[in-house]
Image (cartoon, coloured by chain):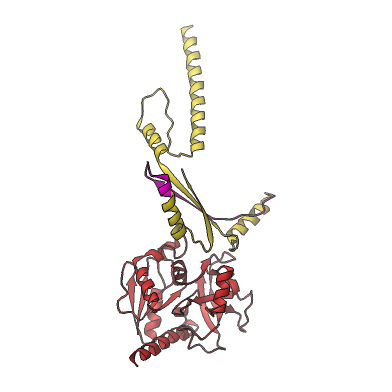
């Protein structure tokens, strides 16, 4: 499987994303933000960082870069797109995912391991995650507070578009386990078509035990399994 | 005697010049033209004065972006509690936003500029999910 990992000026998790994909035995390559084509990509990762210095708003300038037009087209054709941290912010700014991410409620930059509960296995990004399995994954952000208006939230819940929520070590959704003030403890969502997802935590930084956790692999393994089943269906 | 007359004349001239300068600086403050340079009216046009006149002809768009009421505004809250701690009473809310100033070329059609900038503000300069904006063109 071929992953395209976008590179904006000041992306800084692009190498981690490439490393994680290669660790899982698949190929990945960088796609510079000025490119107008993704090449032969099977999935796109919009990585973390501080694209364009986070000027104006996080992700606001990156969404207008040439490569994002190609990503939009790729997503419209059903391609798999995963936005991590700043990548999540870019995808919400681009309108590929609902809602927005604003300043953490305590104004602090949070850099720590948190626990995630997967809300549904019904997505290309969660299908390999066992229902009762909590994911211990690091976060590193200052603007990760998820916001959406009431009607959007109701729609997200009705369509099971919330994929991950912040929980405590016991798996309970509590206010204390919410690191940034996100509505409904939301850590990650997907679009209505379920082929585009974004999350603030960094699964690519949790793919080997040496880094303290390899729970992030489950998200990438889900993506790979989704693509394999899709290409098998195509072949059949 | 002649010397005394000259002294008086000089003093009067100095006073009126000071008053003129004061008035001009007040005018500058009202117009908020930082690069408007005051020149003595009896002097011929200096390059600085030319710049001043050009700067009056220039058009400016001002866009103020504020967080929507429903969105958490921890910056505003923090500034508010700091104001209270400093003893500034009667503050019932603080909202921290952004101010964007855009220079437009002289003679730009105001209505066309307003239309284009409203479009830009909606698409790019603000995020309608979390922010409101106000646009002024002068």
Spot occupied by residue A79 in the image (x, y as percentages of width and height): 38, 79
Q: Is residue A43 visible?
A: yes
Chain identifier matching the red colour in the rendered picture: A
Q: Quadrant of residue A86?
A: bottom left
Of residues A82 and A205, the one nearer the viewer is A82
Q: Is residue A23 magenta?
A: no
Q: Is residue A142 visible?
A: no
Chain B colour is yellow
Q: Quadrant of residue A225?
A: bottom left
Spot occupied by residue A99 in the image (x, y as percentages of width and height): 52, 69
Which residue lies at the image location 40% right of the left edge and 49% below the top edge? B112
Q: Which residues are magenta?
A: B90-113
Instruction: Please indicate whether residue B73 sits to the left or right of residue A125 in the image.
Output: right
Spot occupied by residue A108 in the image (x, y as percentages of width and height): 56, 66
Q: Quadrant of residue A222?
A: bottom left
Spot occupied by residue A89 in the image (x, y as percentages of width and height): 47, 69
Quick check: A42 above or below B78? Answer: below
Of residues A8 and A77, the one nearer the viewer is A77
Q: Is residue B99 magenta?
A: yes
């Amino acid at each position: 499987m071929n992953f395209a990992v976008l590179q904006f000026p000041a992306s800084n998790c692009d190498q981690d994303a490439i490393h994680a994909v290669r660790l899982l035995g698949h190929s990945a390559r960088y796609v510079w933000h000025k490119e107008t084509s993704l090449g032969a990509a099977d999935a796109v990762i919009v990585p973390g960082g501080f694209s364009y210095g986070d000027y104006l708003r996080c992700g606001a300038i990156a969404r207008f870069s040439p490569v994002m037009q190609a990503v939009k087209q790729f997503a419209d054709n059903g391609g798999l797109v995963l936005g991590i941290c700043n990548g999540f912010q870019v995808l919400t700014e681009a309108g590929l995912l609902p809602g927005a991410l604003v300043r953490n409620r305590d104004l602090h930059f949070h850099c720590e391991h948190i626990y995630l509960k997967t809300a549904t296995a019904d997505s290309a990004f969660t299908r390999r995650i066992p229902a009762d399995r909590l994911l211990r994954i690091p976060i590193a952000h200052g603007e990760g507070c998820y916001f959406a208006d009431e009607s959007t939230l109701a729609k997200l819940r009705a369509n099971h578009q919330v994929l991950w929520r912040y929980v405590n070590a016991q798996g309970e959704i509590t206010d204390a386990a919410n690191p940034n003030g996100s509505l409904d403890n939301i850590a990650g969502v997907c679009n209505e078509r379920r082929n585009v997802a974004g999350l603030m935590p960094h699964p690519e930084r949790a793919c080997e035990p040496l880094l303290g956790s390899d729970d992030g692999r489950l998200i990438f393994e889900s993506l790979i399994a989704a693509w394999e089943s899709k290409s098998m269906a195509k072949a059949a | 005697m002649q010397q005394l007359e000259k002294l008086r004349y000089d003093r009067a001239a100095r006073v009126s010049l000071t008053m003129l300068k004061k008035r001009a600086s007040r005018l500058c403050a009202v117009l908020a033209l930082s690069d408007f340079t005051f020149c003595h009216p009896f002097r011929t046009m200096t390059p600085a004065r030319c710049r001043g006149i050009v700067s009056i002809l220039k058009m400016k768009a001002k866009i103020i972006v504020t967080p929507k009421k429903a969105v958490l505004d921890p910056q505003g809250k923090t500034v508010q509690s700091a104001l209270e701690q400093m003893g500034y009473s009667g503050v019932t809310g603080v909202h921290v936003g952004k101010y964007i100033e855009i220079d437009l070329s002289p003679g730009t059609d105001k209505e066309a500029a307003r239309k284009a900038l409203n479009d830009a503000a909606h698409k790019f300069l603000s995020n309608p999910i979390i922010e409101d904006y106000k646009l002024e063109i002068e």
